Image (spheres, rainbow, N blue to C red):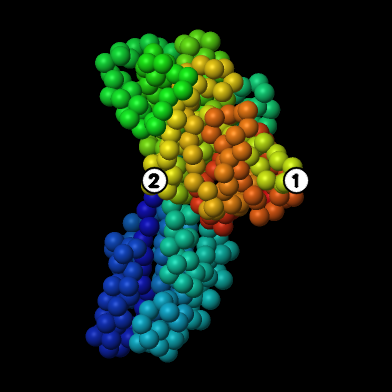
Amino acid sequence: MSVKAVVFAARRYYADEKNLMDIYEKIRAALSADFADIELITEAGEAERLEGGDVLVCLPVSGSVQPNIIAACKKYSSAIVYAGYVSGNFDGDVTRTLLINNAAPSCADVYSVLKREDKPIYLIKSLSELRRKVKVLSAYFALKGAKLLLIGEVEPWVISADRNLEDFYTKMGISFEKIPLSEIIDEYNGIGEGEVNEFCKMWKEKAKKTVEPNEKDLLCASKFNAALLRLIEKHNALGCAIACFKLIGEIGTTACLAASYINTYTKYVVACEGDVDSAVTMLLTKALTNETVWMANPNLQSDESVNFVHCSAPVKVNGKELPLILRSHHESGVGVSTEVTLPTEYSVTAIRISDSLTKATVQRGVAKSGLGEPSCRTQLRVCFDDYGKYISTLLGCHQVFSFGDIKEDMTELIKLFGIEVL
């Protein structure tokens, strides 16, 4: 994703070159941590030298700059007009100079014309808001042209997931490549024990105890982890949805440990049960946060909380390694899964894109201790801000979790794809 920041000034307002350069250098210094290269455009036609890209951040510092900004924005897929004259963005001298030199009406005028374009256009009044917008747009453009794998088929009971894979490309620019289960099985069978000995050792050192799995179980799960990573990378994908239940009968292990590792420690995502909707939701979440994601099932409770459960939980959240027990997969009793003690008393966000990519939910809640129900290994109880809305807008059997409050940013990101957020 390419971002360019440009200061626009008119010479009629800055006859004194020293004054102009003083303002420009102060702005550069204030924004240097956010933008590596900030250009200054003062003359008609100078916008032609810009290379173009995804996001243009325009900072008007005077009047009479509107034509140059319009010309520059034609080269970019989105634009942000930054109202730097607003108090608190720069020091008092800069703010005063921008106001005297009519930067305020320039911002309003150029924004009103730019937003007629069929592309994302924003008018931003603070540096914190600017950073947030750039983060959302970065995720949006990073996802354009992304590829995921569907390994096998969507499991038949995941009836909420979209079976028409073309929808994802048409609506979001994200493609799915279908891979037969035989290909991941071949990868798995081609991995020798010696290739995963260190991986097995790592898991044993991380776990405070192991309950059901034996050495062979851990070896097989580690081999599958290596095979899945190899397959994702071989196909230049950013992750996958995998028909994990059908695999159990084929190779005698599960994808739980692999999903936990990949979702925790790599840039890739893995969704269980061939759930392509969850895979795409996980991809958006990781692109936005660059943090761990988790896919889980909701168990409703009498007190209007929801106990979320799954066997592929991450083992690290917000940079912190978590208490881990190695268990078997809950439903089959096979393989290796992660029973993790997730942190509590912090905000989480539950997300799902579904209904053939027409709708999405983004719900904020507070994490509580899991209830230890006879269900999947890792459990986290969530008290939502609005339980009634959570129920009335439920879109499927799986929710994707971000371990933080990203409701505002995720809502905006999803809307950029033309998807309704309920």
Where residue 132 sits in the image (x, y, percent)?
47, 61
- Pointer 1 local density, CA inside 10 Å: few below 14, some 14–19, many at least 20: few
x then y, percent, for residue 61: 39, 79
Residue 391 in picture, x, y percent from top left: 73, 44
Q: Residue furthest left?
A: 18
Residue 169 is left or right of residue 69, and the answer is: right
What amino acid type is highlighted by mark number 1? Ser
Find disc 2 in the rendering and name its residue.
Answer: 320
Q: Position of residue 150 (x, y in %)?
A: 52, 25
Above or below, 169 relative to 349: above
Kindly indicate the quadrant of the structure image that contains residue 381. Answer: top right
Residue at 28% from the left image edge and 86% from the top image edge: 19
Viewer-proximal residue, 419 or 50?
419
Residue type beneath disc 2: Lys
Q: Is residue 286 above or below residue 258?
A: below
Q: Which mark is residue 392?
A: 1
